[in-house]
Amino acid sequence: MMAGDGATSANRYGHDGAPGGDTASESRSLGDGSLSTRLDNAERRRIADIALRLFAQHGYSQVTMRDVAEASGVSRATIFRYFSKKENLILASLDDLMQEMARLIENLGSTPERPCVLDLEPVCHDLAVLVTAKIDGVLPPRTEVSQDSSLVDHLARAQSQAEDLMAVLLARRAGIFAPDIEMQVCARVTIVLFVAALDAWLIAAPSSSLNDLVDEAFRAFERVATPRQ
């Protein structure tokens, strides 16, 4: 699920150092706090949660947008107002995850020190707790996901956006204008480790905990990153 290269470019980062393209997680978490926006966000989250329960009960491929509308007590037009495609119902959970990632990194506080992948391991463990609570038994089986090319493309894009967002947050934490290559590498490696743990969990769950697999992924990184004696 790796996406993109490590180069900073105008189409990846905006003039203020924020990720470009479709990455809206940071702007949503830090942006308009009006009542109408909060109500829209609450309704969007409510519909997504109902859809996730339907996916868990009946399987992702068996649930239609009409089913989601009926279970949510709204019209199909309302569903499509918030979610143009069915896969976006799952991606809404990933958007929540990126907002939580931003909060966790900002809570680490400012530091002029260069980023270290292992310093971000606690963030990944906190994210694992959130993922487990939110999607345990809900996401479609990995085999079903891999057969949906559109969903795979969206998930790859979401991973790339998460990497970009983390790089921007690391730069902000260090008090610099935009992420340099070291911060980009740190962000990408951290997200890849988390995704590797998540992939393993979707195959092994419920026999393994996501938190244990995150720990295993970081220990594997330590082994492959340490020079042989």
Image (spheres, rainbow, N blue to C red):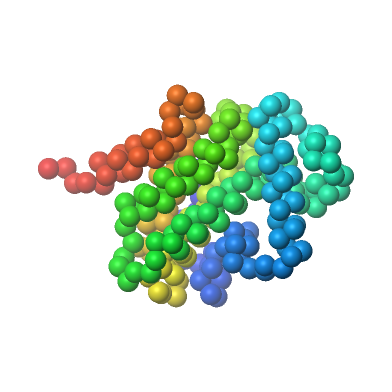
Q: Is residue 132 visible?
A: yes
Locate residue 213, reporting x and y percent: 39, 35
Locate residue 229, reporting x and y percent: 12, 43
Locate residue 49, reporting x and y percent: 68, 41
Residue at the spot 72% in from the left edge and 46% down from the top edge: 46
Residue 161, picture quadrant: bottom right
Q: Is residue 66 visible?
A: no
Q: Which residue occupies the extreme top position in the image?
A: 207
**Which residue is more in the foreground, 144 or 109?**
109
Residue 181, picture quadrant: bottom left
User: Is the residue 18 above or below the residue 77 in the image?
Assistant: below
**Which residue is more in the foreground, 74 or 65?**
74
Residue at the spot 42% in from the left edge and 51% down from the top edge: 123
Residue at the spot 72% in from the left edge and 39% down from the top edge: 50
**Which residue is more in the foreground, 124 or 36?**
36
Locate residue 38, reporting x and y percent: 71, 60
Residue at the spot 48% in from the left edge and 42% down from the top edge: 129
Residue 214, picture quadrant: top left
Q: Which residue occupies the extreme left position in the image?
A: 229
Q: Which residue occupies the extreme front position in the image?
A: 35
